Image (tube, rainbow, N blue to C red):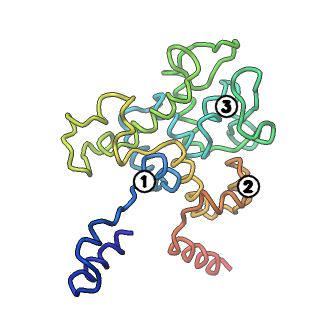
């Protein structure tokens, strides 16, 4: 639309259209929720955030929450539904997380029983979770007597707590102490209160982490069917709504495939 307005301005200059046509053209702007449908957190940004959390907030609630969503690509409802016993630190074939549909106890999974799965996790995430349990996890139970894996002082975190935390840690000023929007950090409305962190134009929702995790998995060479199983979605949904691979990414993977033969 903006390109078309530039063209109209050119037409005005050469007398092709009446003056003022370009100015009268309304250019729609997407709001935060509309942008989030196509936004993704890049692997580079995710790595920088994890580096910051690893250094300055190791094994904190924020560290574990971000690490879980980025590593597993899980939904907000899925990550808050995890119980302490759903973290399998040791098993014959390595550590894993177990997602269980418990609708009668306030933690349903989106696709109900079909959402139940046991994705493996990296050793680095296992260590962070184990250290969180030993040092920062509150020894609390929820209203059903269950022990949540992720906790606040009050018990199991609400979805809004998960969302606000992700918005907060994805603000560039949080992990770089710089603002790409030329705002005064100390005076910015998105700083200082988790409730307003989403007002930062560069902050990202949990859903963008899920989309970024999907793309990262594919860029790492994970087959589509395996990635979709891990993240509880169909391959068609993965391709249509979550895969934001560039053509360069796809070409690189094809080259690596050819070179491995």
Dot 1: element: loop
**Residue at image mark 2:** 234
Seen in the image, is 71 located left or right of residue 81?
Answer: left
Q: Earlier in the sequence, mark 1 or mark 2?
A: 1
Task: Pick whichever, 222 or 54, lies toward us.
Answer: 222
Q: Quick check: 66 above or below 13?
A: above
* Mark identifier at residue 87: 3
**Mark number, residue 6:** none
Between 20 and 181, the one lying in front of the other is 20
Q: Residue at x 49, y 54 (%)?
A: 40
Q: Whole-Å distance between the Cαs marked 2 and 3?
A: 25 Å
Q: Farthest right residue?
A: 113
Q: For the residue labelled by badge 3, is the local secondary structure a helix, a strand or a loop? A: strand
- Tags 1 and 2 in contact by the CB under 8 Å rule? no
Q: Which residue is mark 1?
A: 30
x, y percent for residue 198: 39, 39
Q: Nearer the viewer, mark 2 or mark 3?
A: 2
Coordinates of residue 197 in the picture (x, y in percent):
37, 36
The answer to whether 41 appears left or right of 155 in the picture is: left
Q: Quadrant of residue 14?
A: bottom left
Residue 176 in the image: state x and y as whole percent.
29, 45
User: Where is residue 155 drawn, in percent x and y?
Assistant: 57, 16
Question: Does residue 201 appear left or right of residue 254 in this picture?
Answer: left
For this orientation, the residue located farthest to the front is 18
CA gap, disc 3 and disc 1? 39 Å
């Amino acid at each position: 639309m903006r390109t078309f307005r530039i063209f109209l301005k050119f037409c005005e200059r050469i007398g092709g259209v009446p003056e003022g046509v370009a100015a009268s053209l309304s250019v729609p702007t997407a709001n935060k929720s509309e942008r989030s449908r196509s936004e993704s957190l890049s692997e580079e940004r995710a790595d920088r955030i994890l580096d910051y959390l690893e250094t300055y907030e190791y094994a904190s609630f924020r560290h574990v929450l971000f690490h879980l969503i980025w590593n597993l690509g899980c939904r907000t409802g899925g990550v808050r539904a995890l119980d302490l016993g759903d973290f399998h630190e040791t098993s014959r074939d390595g550590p894993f997380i177990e997602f269980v549909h418990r609708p009668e106890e306030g933690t349903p999974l989106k696709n109900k029983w079909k959402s139940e799965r046991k994705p493996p996790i990296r050793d680095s995430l296992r260590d962070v979770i184990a250290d969180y349990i030993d040092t920062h996890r509150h020894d609390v139970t929820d209203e059903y007597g269950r022990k949540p894996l992720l906790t606040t002082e009050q018990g199991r975190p609400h979805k809004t707590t998960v969302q606000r935390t992700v918005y907060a840690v994805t603000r560039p000023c949080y992990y770089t102490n710089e603002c790409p929007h030329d705002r005064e950090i100390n005076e910015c409305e998105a700083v200082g209160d988790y409730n307003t962190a989403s007002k930062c134009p560069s902050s990202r929702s949990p859903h963008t982490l899920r989309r970024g995790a999907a793309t990262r998995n594919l860029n790492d060479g994970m087959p589509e069917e395996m990635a979709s199983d891990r993240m509880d979605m169909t391959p068609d949904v993965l391709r249509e709504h979550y895969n934001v691979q560039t053509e360069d990414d796809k070409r690189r993977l094809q080259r690596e495939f050819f070179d491995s033969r």
